[in-house]
Amino acid sequence: MQVVSISSLKGGVGKTSVTLGLASAALAAGAPTLVVDLDPHADATTGLGVRPSGQTDVGRLLRNARREDLGANIVPAGWVATASPQVARSTALLDVAMGSAYSGIYDRPDLGRRDQRRLSTLLSKVTGYSLVLIDCPPSLNGLTRMAWTASNKVLLVAEPALFSVAGTERTMRALELFRREYAPELQTAGIVANKVRATSNEHAYRLAEMKQMFGDLLLQPTIPDQVNWQQIQGAAHALHQWPGESAHQAAGYFDELLRSVLDSGRLRSRGIRR
């Protein structure tokens, strides 16, 4: 079971959109997947069309991680009910550990080592998934460290813009320090450039800058700015199920990105290029 944290130090870069795009690609591929919504805003839970019926959210499960049963509190994504017949006949499984504002009690800078293992404890009790995607809050506080402790890999999301690139550089340094102190086996799945506008000279410049700074950690393909993302997410639909050539092309980008993430290797200790 591969556990991948989707992280960003800066908000607004489309971290949750990337999580949902990867979840859609995994569903289309028939890969049994669990999405853990660790962001207190719980936008991934909303975008996945979750309809709970008495299950406990992940924040409250974390409070009593040793006693709680995550498997008994997961909720099927609403996407599965509207999946294509081909997907429905496959081994497709897309479940959600629901997010809530309650998890914010752990998003503090002084989270201890024992508390950092709460999510690992919950995930150790679940089976049947080939992939777990953790949607992290846009910070490097306790919840993100909790997610990184539970993960095999970390995928960073950035926009090709000045502040986002600078934030990604800081996140890379924080990830390396965390790996040295807490998780020597933690890998990076790379950096995905999101919301890319092909007609923007600024974006072209920043992409070249990112390539120089991060080398082959900058994944291909980059994800273009999708004009109908808000409509797709507002309807709580999978990208791969949305009609139109634009959505079909974007779905192909996420299929390729998912393969890149799953095939990514260990973070090399060569530092960030200057």
Image (spheres, helix red, strand yellow):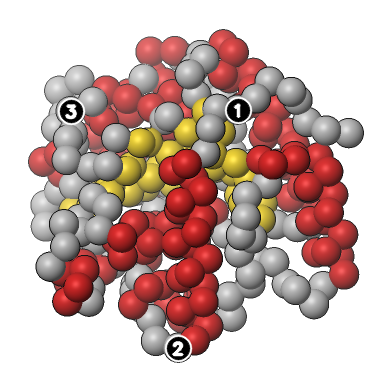
Residue 132 rendering spot, x and y as whole percentages: 33, 42
Query: Residue at 43% across / 39% down in the picture?
Result: 4
Name which of mark 1 and mark 2 comes first in the sequence: 2
Q: Amino acid at mark 2?
A: Gly
Residue 213 visible from this viewpoint: yes
| Residue 48 visible (yes or no) | no
Give how far apart the Cα atoms at labels 2 and 3 are.
40 Å
Residue located beneath label 2 in the image = 244
Can you say which quadrant of the picture contains the C terminus?
top right
Can you give x and y, in whole percent of width and height, for residue 183 in the image?
Answer: 49, 17
Residue 22, placed above or below residue 119: below
Q: The disc labelled 1 sits on which kind of residue?
A: Leu
Q: Badge 3: few (under 14), some or many (20 or more) residues near its Cα, within 10 Å?
A: few
Query: In this figure, which residue is indicated by the disc labeled 3?
Result: 125
Residue annotated with mark 1: 267
Mark 1 to mark 2 CA distance (whole Å): 37 Å
* Alpha carbon separation for disc pair 1 and 3: 27 Å
Does residue 40 appear left or right of residue 77 in this picture?
Answer: right
Foreground: 71 or 212? 212
Picture disc at residue 55: none
**Three-letter amino acid code of the residue under disc 3:** Lys
First along the sequence among labels 2 and 3: 3
Q: Tag 1: Cα neighbours inside 10 Å, few (<14), some, or many (≥20)?
A: some
